[in-house]
Amino acid sequence: MAGTTAIELAGLTRLYGERAALAGVSLAVPAGATLAVLGANGAGKTTLLRVLATLLRPHAGLVRVLGRELPREGWAVRGHVGLLAHEPLLYRDLTGRENLSYHARLHGVPARRVAELLVRVGMENRADEPLRALSRGMVQRLAVCRAVLHDPEVLLLDEPRSHLDPAAAELAEPLVGREARREKGGRRTRVLTSHDPAAALAESDLALGLRRGRPAFFAPARSISADRAGELYR
C-alpha cells in the first residue's frame, strides 16, 4: 500500500475551539524512515499523532498517509497504522491475552501471533490476569503488543519507552525501535514523540520541532543539534 512517501502534510491545521493545536505543518516522510516530533507539553505532538491515526480530523490542509487522504479515506488507512499512545487503549477488566485476542480478531490476525508477542515482551506468565491487577509497566508491554499486532506499515509512538524499565525497554526494542522490521519485510515508517531530544534525534532520520503548534523546523535529524532541539522545551 505504501509508496515512496508514507506521510505527507501540507498546511495541516487542527483547532481546539479557537486555539490552534497545530497550524501550518508541512512535511514529507519517506517509507521506512523515522520522524522525531519534538516540543514542550502542549506543542501539538500528541495531536499530530492522533490526526495521523485517524482519531482526529484536520480542520485545514492536506494529510496523506500511505497515499490515502485523511479523513476521506481513513477507512483504508486504519488497518495499516499502529498507535502506542499515552493511554494503553486496552480494557482493564479483560486479561492481557483477552485484550490482544480481541484486537487480533478485529484485524484478522491468527491467534499464534498473540502468543508469540506475549513471549517476546516477557508477559506469557502474566497474560491471564486482568489488566487492573498488573503494574503500569506490564500494561505498557501489552500496549506495545497491541500496537504491532497487525504488522502495521506506519507506527505512531507517543513517548514509547515511558513506564518501561530498562529490561522491558530492551524487550520492546525489536518491536518498536529504529531497526524494527515488518513480518512481510522492510522497515516500518515511525513517527515518535519524545521529551529527550538527544535520544530521539539519534534514532531518527527526520526531525520536526513544534512550538505552540507551529513548526520551528523540519530537517534531517543529523542537522539538528540537541541544544537547538532542547530550546523547544524551555
Image (spheres, rainbow, N blue to C red):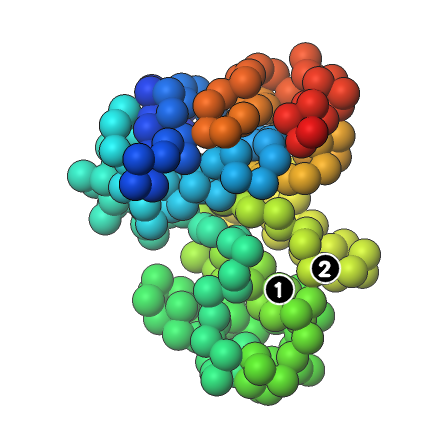
* Viewport quadrant of the N terminus: top left
Determine whether 62 is above or below 172 in the image.
above
Number of dots carrying numbers: 2
- Counting residues from the start of the chain, the first of labels 2 and 1 encountered is 1
The picture places residue 143, in percent across and down from the top left corner, at: 55, 63
Determine whether 100 is above or below 13 in the image.
below
- Out of 50 and 125, give the one closest to the viewer: 50
- For the point 64% across and 40% down, the residue is 194
The picture places residue 92, in percent across and down from the top left corner, at: 50, 79
* Mark 1 neighbour class, 10 Å CA radius: few under 14, some 14 to 19, many 20 or more: many
How far apart are the alpha carbons under marks 2 and 1? 7 Å
As shown in the figure, which amino acid type bears the numbered disc 2?
Leu
- For the point 61% across and 35% down, the residue is 40
The picture places residue 212, in percent across and down from the top left corner, at: 50, 29
- Out of 84 and 44, give the one closest to the viewer: 44
* Viewport quadrant of the C terminus: top right
As shown in the figure, which amino acid type bears the numbered disc 1?
Gln
Residue 172 image label: none
Q: Secondary structure at mark 1?
A: helix
User: Would you name the residue on which mark 2 appears?
Assistant: 164
The picture places residue 77, in percent across and down from the top left corner, at: 30, 44
Q: Residue 150: which quarter of the image?
A: bottom left
- Using the rendered image of the protein, determine whether residue 188 is visible from the camera's viewpoint: no
Q: Is residue 226 left or right of residue 74?
A: right
Determine whether 46 is above or below 105 in the image.
above
Q: Is residue 65 left or right of residue 200?
A: left
- Using the rendered image of the protein, determine whether residue 227 is visible from the camera's viewpoint: yes
User: Would you name the residue on which mark 1 appears?
Assistant: 140
Determine whether 159 is above or below 95 in the image.
above
Cβ–Cβ under 8 Å for marks 2 and 1: yes
